Amino acid sequence: MTVIDGGLVQPADSPKQSTWLWLHEWATTVDHKKLGLMYISSGLLFFVIAGLEASMMRIQLALPNNDFVGPETFNRLMTVHGTTMVFFVGMPVFFGFGNYLVPLMIGARDLAFPRLNAFGFWLFLFGGLLFYFSWLGGDGLYGMGTAPDVGWFAYSPLTAPAFAPGNSTDYWILGIMIAGFGSTGTALNFVATILCMRCPGMTFMKMPLFVWLMLVNGFLVLVALTPLTAAQVMLLFDRFLGSHFFDTQAGGDAVLWQHFFWVFGHPEVYILIIPAFAIASEITPVFSRKPIFGYEIMVAATVGIGFISLGVWAHHMFTVGLSSGVNTFFAASTMAIAVPTGIKIFNWLGTMWGGRIRFEMPMLWVTAFLFEFVIAGLTGVMLAVVPFDWQLSDSYFVVAHFHFVLIGGLLYNIFAGIYYWFPKATGKMLSKKWGHWHFWVFVFGFNLTFGTMHFQGLLGMPRRIYTFDPGRGWDMLNLITSIGVIFQVLGVLFFVWNVVSSLAWGEDADDDPWDGWTLEWSTTSPPPAYNFETIPTVRSRRPLWDLKHPEDPDWHHE
Amino acid sequence: MSTANETITADEWTLPSRGHVGMLCLILTECAFFAIFIVAHLFYLGKSLVGPYAADVLELPVVGTIFLLSSSITITLAIRALRQGHQAAFNALWLTTIIFGLIFLIGTGFEWYGLIYDQGLTIRTNLLGTTFYSLVGFHAAHVTIGLLMLTGVLIFSFAGLIHVGEAERVDVLSWYWHFVDAVWVVVLTVIYLIV
Amino acid sequence: MTSDTPGMRRFRCRHRVGRGVVSTVLALVALSLALPTVVGGEESPIEFDQISNMFEPVSVPAQRIRELAELVIAICAGIFLVVGVLLTYVIIRFRARPGDEKREPPQVYGSNNLEAAWTIIPVIIVVVLFLATARTINEVELKEPMEGALEVTVVGHRWWWEFEYPEYGIITANELHIPVSTPERPWPTFLWLESQDVVHSFWVPRLAGKTDVVPNRRNTLWIDTAEPGMYLGQCAEYCGTQHAHMLLRVYVHSEEDFDAWVKAQQAPEVVDASVADGRNLFQRTACINCHTLDGTVADGTYGPSLSHLMSRKTIGAGAAFNNAENLRKWVQDPALFKPGVRMPDMKLTSEEVDQLVAYLVTLK
Amino acid sequence: MSNEEHEEGIELPAPTLWPLLAAFGMTLGFAGLVTHPFVSVTGIVCFFVAGFGWWREVLPHQHEELVPLVPVELRAKPVQPVTASVETLDLGEEGHRMRLPTHVFPLSAGIRGGIVGGIAMAITAEIFGFFVFDSLWYPVNLLAATAMPSLASADTSVLIRFDAAALGLAILIHAILSLLMGLLYAVILPIFAKSPAIFGGIIAPLLWTGLLSTGLGVINPALADRIAWEWFAASQIAFGLTAGFVIARMERIETLQSAPLAVRAGLEMKTPSKGDQ
Ligand code: HEA
Ligand code: HEA
Ligand code: CUA
Ligand SMILES: [Cu+2]
């Protein structure tokens, strides 16, 4: 081992540090905690941008025959909004949480491959920047801006050179592909870290659920993301080399792309929701003051979800005219996934049952998540009923379904996680007062917007239309939907204000403000670069419980 | 801060090596990558609207296959030699592996030359060209990357930097090479044997 | 946990905060209801008074789907009720109360029985749901035309629909005319779905579920309705810029009316000498490269057939009502109603447009 | 693991700019496709330079830096025992923590109960078919109609005839549902330990019948059209009573409540520490 001279880093809060040094420190860091924070904050930045894009769409759709933006712009906003939210918000924020927490929870000093981790982060960031560069320079460096307008699943042959001239589609391919390389690296890192770097005593069945879920998620990213990369490479070949993978003129098949995309796309939505489940699984026990109910079956259900999710993709294709045998099979597999998911819901309920639930901000968000996610999952089951899906597919009902899972499931847990671990990462508590404003206003706005959307769908409104005519029964509903967004924006603003003001003059946090049980609460807030002075040893799933209750530790019972 | 513990001490605590786990993960995602190209190839079998067709132009690359598969054996022997401290044997076997891989690549080069200039099959010609060149091309690209890394190790070894202590890290690399070989078996089957 | 940790303290003052939030939220609702009136919408070129509600089916497939849908919705509502009530109960019953920080609740790890129960019950529900789904799939999905069906080939184009009746030699656009099917005379309609370019989706909620229109494939759909009337539908798969204006209408006629419509469509175009100028202009202009018009040299297939144009209620796949005024605007600048449309602005003089439109309106 | 601990600090991987540069180069390399080939060239050069730098960073040994330990007074305090008491439940030998309930029926009891109950139910249904419609196939076909559109709309003359596909399907449906119900009984009966016979034999079947009657029109239209509710309920009760009886007779076994799943499944070999059974 070599010790480089001058390698003693200054503490991050040294007032003398110039901006340049500060930048240099963050640009060169390989520390999992710094990278985690960078992931989360750039993800949130993208969230605000994509949220603004959504707001513009909602202004356009507030009234019939509105002309706030034209069709081209709307289609670009729609595509970029969806793509950003999935690839540049959901994935990086959860990678951030994983980055920050996995080593702390398993009692390690860093991820298995710290430099690969940095590489992955920068790939994600530059991929996102390249993607957004399309708003400025689409057709060649000096061309007019052309963001992609093919929808987030970019169905062929709409992406074929004949129908998508210029470079807009290429930006979609490249931005996601580059970020995808990074994600694959990060997932590999998570798996290797969890398998190889757990502290002594932490057997598989003693890992915190968060870590288990990130492990499953890592595997899912490894097997599901590369198919998208492969399909995108094919599309690139089609567009740049003149090959014919998806060229319907040369006998290529449009449906092949759909299979390839959804082979990735469906696991992708579970890649997004499993880390959200992971956060809920940490917060629920701590604030209910009970261990997680049915740990083993929670693990089994997660692994089950992971496996089943690889075999349900064609439920996004019920309307393309597959044979009835295929449709039946995918209806069955899709419905089957309701079972392990239900197990999780009920086990969280079981954890809360008989507890003394402290409704701090994290727990409030998780509770709201339970409500919204049950609704979301049940609309998912309706979509899985193939004949019903023939009516609902590609309507606003689907839009409502997936915003309920993506916001009610994903975003709520992101918020929960931020309220929960913010003290650990920054040493400051988030204000509870602003937290409440954020919570109630956002939850109200969310339900107003997306609860309403189900009805447009049932009344026959297709998605991805830039405008609609009056008198079709959608006018009032669309107006209400758009009004809801005002509240969501306000809610987000309260949140931003909460973060900024708490950082500036918030209350200091102890090492263990929530009376938690996992290893991250045993180190300082924020933790030192090396996390732990000595690597801890654990004997149960709740090492801190053992220390706090020496008279009755968990390992007597596990 | 450590929980007082009688049963587990850090010494008894052994976990898999992260190099090998990382490599396995890489192999897993690469499998998914190749699987998609293989599915595309199988899906488009016989669907080309214009010729040339596979049965008419593709010939089983016997020589290249033999060399590539043999290289898996030589690399295993090389690692064993390294573990036993036979530095010279390691260098020789490692070099052989690289040469075998090169021969395979050269074979592919000749095959492509023939296809393009004699048979008129390019990636733009038809669906066969599209899937054939992508699949074989990606495999060849993996062989190339593998060869670059093998060569790197060889240079280090000549520089005297590779010893018994490095055997595990070199072993990780050899897993990649085995994977590339295994993929070839599958590619060979779907492209040349199923027509 | 000791009583003075920050979390605990904030927990107690929650109620006051809550009340303030609720009243402010209400005030904001009132404010925002007033807000959008400021943003004005364009005056509409077309207005509908029909709601395509899938729960008011008038055709057999849509009816089957509705029945199944009601079952699923009932089951799901039941599940939601159970989970929702449990959750509410838990929230109220098991919330921490002052003084609780001194005691930890019993540490229950789980229950094999309960866990098994809430695995098995969903499995049973799923099995039942699946069986009903499987049967309905087979009831509704039909790959070959049934006996005595009227066959129509539907071709999706960016961004309009082409309807071909091989039996009658009719080709028309955007408005599908079909007969009623009664117990006395079962006369279902069987649609072959094809695409010229990208993927579209044929969807008329009150008649049948949607089916995608995919290049290089031939999908199928059927309608069997006893209710005459007009039913609105729309392309339901994103197909590019004007996906929003790819509407379609289905007219269901009584048997006599349908026969009359067929006769009218089959009749040759009446040549009206008073609009000969327009007719000549039309035949000299690029129109003929893209449009077909019986009785003229126009035989293009890139745009919709203009034969019997005036028998259609709308132009531009529902972008505007079909009348002289709108036709004039359309020919002058198609992008006015439909920005991004595939029909170019022909840069005709105002006079030429008048002549053309005068001719077009005679195409009864 | 690499991070070595010393007196004065801990060695961690040293910060490095190469990953950022490599990522930047890679992005530029691709960006050239949509901008100008020159961008690609710059990117590729950048990528290889960074790749080489990175290589030097880890080979033959990775660069590390010594991070000094924070002063003792700033370190995390050892976790202290808390004063909060932990409440106990009334039941259970081990006091306040356990999997509940502690005594359950083995799953095999559920399977057995399901099989026996399923047979009893089938017999009741067959008696109905035989005496009322003179056909053993009638109930079978009715059940199969759940998933067979041809039978769902068929009339009685068809329904009393033999149909091999329907027989297979009906057996499958019947077997799956019977097994599931048997298992459910086995797990739920202990919860209603006081009066398992009344619950399992009467209340549950009647509940089930009532629930089905609401959705039956869609689940199985053929059955809904011609169902004889008294017979239906009778067959359900036959199931409930026999299954419940079979299950309740089985001895309740001790669960391996404290052994981790992985140990029970043989996934992990670690012997449980003391206090575990
Ligand atoms: C985080 C993301 C996420 C999650 C978790 C889910 C979860 C599910 N989704 Fe969703 N889905 C999306 C994101 C997600 N989805 C997106 C983004 C799209 C649209 C893509 C696009 O077109 O752009 C989509 C679209 C989509 C479709 C295609 C619709 C169409 O385009 O035609 C379908 C169809 O089957 C579907 C089904 C389901 C099901 C069955 C679940 C299940 O996992 C839900 C399981 C949960 C429950 C069922 C609730 C809890 C369970 C119980 C309380 C137990 C008891 C319940 C029963 C017995 C039923 N989803
Ligand atoms: C994680 C995923 C995610 C999230 C969070 C959201 C959030 C939102 N989405 Fe999104 N959406 C998708 C994923 C997501 N969406 C996807 C995948 C699609 C499909 C795309 C496709 O069809 O291809 C889609 C499509 C989609 C549509 C359908 C478009 C169409 O079919 O025509 C609509 C329409 O209303 C919509 C609206 C919204 C709104 C109003 C929000 C709101 O919740 C957003 C709220 C957030 C904000 C409003 C941020 C505002 C913040 C500020 C303004 C503060 C700024 C100030 C400072 C920084 C100081 N979305
Ligand atoms: Cu055609 Cu959308
Ligand atoms: Cu899905």
Image (spheres, coloured by chain):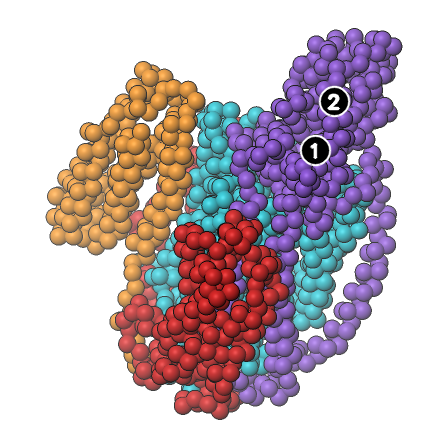
Q: Residues within 10 Å of mark 1 (few under 14, many from 20)?
A: many
The location of residue B64, given as percent across then percent down, is 22, 30
- Label 1 SS: strand
Residue occupying image coordinates x 18% and y 38%: B70
For the N terminus of chain D, give its image quadrant.
Answer: bottom left
Question: Chain C's shade in the image?
Answer: purple
Query: Residue B168: percent from the left, percent from the top?
Result: 24, 53
Given residues C336 and A100, the one toward you in this image is C336
Determine the chain carrying the residue at label 1: C
Q: Tell me what hue chain A is rendered in.
A: cyan
- Secondary structure category for the residue under label 2: helix
- Give the residue drawn at x 60%, y 46%: A390
Examine the rendering and report whether any part of residue A325 can be seen.
yes
Position above or below: A85 against A193: above
Q: Which residue is mark 2?
A: C263
Palette colour of chain D: red
Give the quadrant of the C terminus of chain D: bottom left
| Among numbered discs 1 and 2, the one appearing first in the sequence | 1
The kind of residue tagged 2 is Lys
Label 1 is placed on what type of residue?
Ile
**From what the image shows, is residue D58 above or below residue D49?**
below
Is residue D193 found left or right of A352 in the rendered image? left
Image location of residue D154, percent across then percent down: 54, 51
Q: Respond whether the residues carrying marks 1 and 2 are from the same subunit.
A: yes
Horizontal side of residue D107 vs D205, given as left or right: left
Which residue is labeled 1 in the image? C178
Could you say which quadrant of the image residue D255 lies in? bottom left
Q: Residue at x 35, y 49 (%)?
A: B28
